[in-house]
Amino acid sequence: MGAAPASRDVTSYGMGLAAPLALFFLLFFVAPLLQLFWLSLHNDTAGLHWGLGQYLHFLTDPFSLSVLGSTLLLGAEVTAVCLVLGFPIAWLYQRVGPRLQTIIILIVLLPLLTSVVVRTFAWIVILGRQGIINATLQSLGIIDTPLKLLYTQFGVVIALAQVQMPLMTLPLITALGRIDPNLDDASCSLGAGSWRTFFRVVLPLSLPGVIAGCTLTYAAAITAFITQSLVGGGQMLFMPMYLYQQASTLQNWPFASAISIIFLLAVLAVVSVFTTLGRLSRGYGGA
Amino acid sequence: MAEAQGGRSLVVDAVTHRYPSGALAVENINLDIKGGEIIALLGPSGCGKTTLLRIIAGFIAQTQGRIIIGDDIVDTLPPNRRAVGIVFQNYALFPHLSISENVAYGLAARGIDKATRQRESQRLLELVQLPTMAERLPRQLSGGQQQRVALARALAIKPSILLLDEPFAALDKNLRLDMQIEVKRLQRVSGITTLIVTHDQEEALSMADRVAVLSQGKLEQFGTPSDVYDRPQTLFVNTFVGSSNRMPGVVVSADRTAAKIRLDAGAEIIARPAAGALTEGGRVTVCIRPEHLQFVGDETGFAGVVGMSLPLGATVVHEVTTADGSGVKISQARIGETRALDSGAAVRLAPLAPSLANAFPATL
Ligand SMILES: Nc1ncnc2c1ncn2[C@@H]1O[C@H](COP(=O)(O)OP(=O)(O)OP(=O)(O)O)[C@@H](O)[C@H]1O
Ligand SMILES: [Mg+2]
């Protein structure tokens, strides 16, 4: 075919263009990662004795395992909240006029336009003992003593969900926008009600977007150091903070490195579950 | 076939629709369709065909008027309760469901058990001659096959009315002919009242029992294909359906069945007042189809000069410029050695018969 040589040209061209980024990645991502891995294989902080001691320590220490578990759980909770709240927004977006669409997109993107630190402090103001929620509830006489919202799992999940919401909503909007609106009508004319249409047509066809959104939100939520530590406070410990303490405060670099590697593998495992699901649903996406 | 309720009548009663944006898409449409008829909705792009179809299906609530299916006024029923089958122009098959699941979709929505669904979808796939495709996904089918599946899916719910929106527009010519025959066959077998939207006049004339011609949201004419073709009621219908020469002229004398017209091209002819009585002295447009013109000798007819001759297979079309400078087309059957006409030859033309020239009051 005449097209074959042309397409080979195009790929070799593309490879050349990717070289600077590849080099950058090699220098500042792959190399430090290898160094990290090398560090984690030492049993003592001085780095004199080789061994898998750090990994053994982590995997046999109930405290470390519970930090890992609660971090992965936190990610799942944030992802679930984002999905449940983000889907209706994305769905609405496809069904309103262009002016409302602009407003919705603006609301969705707004969190991305302010710094994470600012947004997190806003949540502290909202959730605090004398914060907006408690003050309002108290002045309305609904509660006597302030509710504990800040420094709780609930607070962290809510704050993280707000911070990561765009990562869920944008892929969903794209996925829903790809669905032929005639499919809705076709389903309806075949006698299906709106719920059946949603579960049999809209949801399956938006699965690629759901999976992309979940992967992004999950990965972002479990690694969100600032929001986790500021809203979670001292009582709640998640992997990024645990890692930070080991490295910075305790200067236990080999253990911190092992934590990093284990955390990385755990995240990769979860993400690859998502992508496998995505590949399985590839048949759905269609054009 | 057990399409028990096939053949319900459909009445479109004084339906007007204005979109929220203000566009008046259809205006005072009246159609009285008998059970089991095939009707073609014919009109140029943007004339409101899809809008009317969507009103009948229930996707759009019309601004005014009523839709009556059988004995029921269905205006308050949502689309999923109207039992109207619809085939979309782009087929709108569910891309994530197999062919048999697509066909069975409507049955599942009706809570019919799995075994029956499978049997029924297999029966329908055999009906549309795709029995071996059941497990494939829609994108693994060709356009024509997808079309058949869309048809089978719509028929599966045993609709009382079947709506087809430009069903053959995306198909190439041969396949289109096959599918037209196929749809007509299926319609005859099932007896389902069918409405086909098209802007292809040949399709409308060949498939439909009656043709509704729309223009700019208004119904121009609703009649049998021969009515619409041979006895057009408006200038629009005359020129939109089939091709037609438009020749301006003045009414010399007129009664209800015939009018003597002096053409600007320079001859007096007898024409049929197609849109009601004509007033003497009024300006008219006379429509004569190319195949209804003949070359004449001597002093009858109007004079012209041959421009170009186009041999189009079975016919030859000559372009003739008349005395007033307008162009007229005349087509002749190619019988044996057709007389070759040189460019620049002087000829005289006349209609084959008075009833084949239609006179319409000229619009300003
Ligand atoms: N959703 C809408 N909002 C506003 N105006 C619309 C809308 N849909 C259609 N129209 C207008 O209504 C008129 C009729 O449109 P419709 O789609 O019914 O035409 P059609 O006959 O099906 O044309 P085509 O042959 O191109 O499909 C057009 O002038 C169109 O611009
Ligand atoms: Mg249309």
Image (spheres, rainbow, N blue to C red):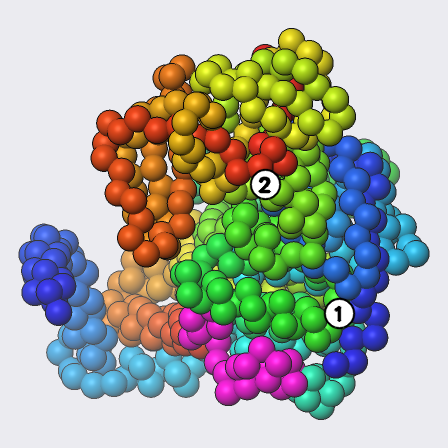
* Helix, strand or loop at mark 2: loop
Residue A46 horizontal side relative to residue B79, left or right = left
Q: Which residues are magenta?
A: B121-145
Picture quadrant where residue A101 is located? top right
Residue B113 has which mark?
none
Say if labels 2 and 1 share a chain.
Answer: yes
Task: Specify whether tag 1 is near ligand 2 (CB below 8 Å).
Answer: no
Tell how many labels.
Answer: 2
x, y percent for residue A30: 16, 65
Task: Specify whether residue A72 is in view.
Answer: no
Amino acid type assigned to the residue bearing label 1 in the image: Gly
Give the quarter the ligand 2 occupies. Answer: top right
Q: Which disc, if any, is residue B43? A: 2
Neighbours of disc 2 within 10 Å: few (<14), some (14-19), many (20+):
many
- The location of residue A227, given as percent across then percent down, is 47, 50
Camera-side residue of A72 and B194 = B194
Specify few, some or many for label 1: CA neighbours under 10 Å numbering under 14, 14-19, or 20 or more: many
Q: Which chain is indicated by disc 2?
A: B
Task: Look at the image and tell me in which quarter the N terminus of chain A lies.
Answer: bottom left
> Who's the residue at 35% across and 64% down the image?
A243
Q: Which residue is mark 1?
A: B191
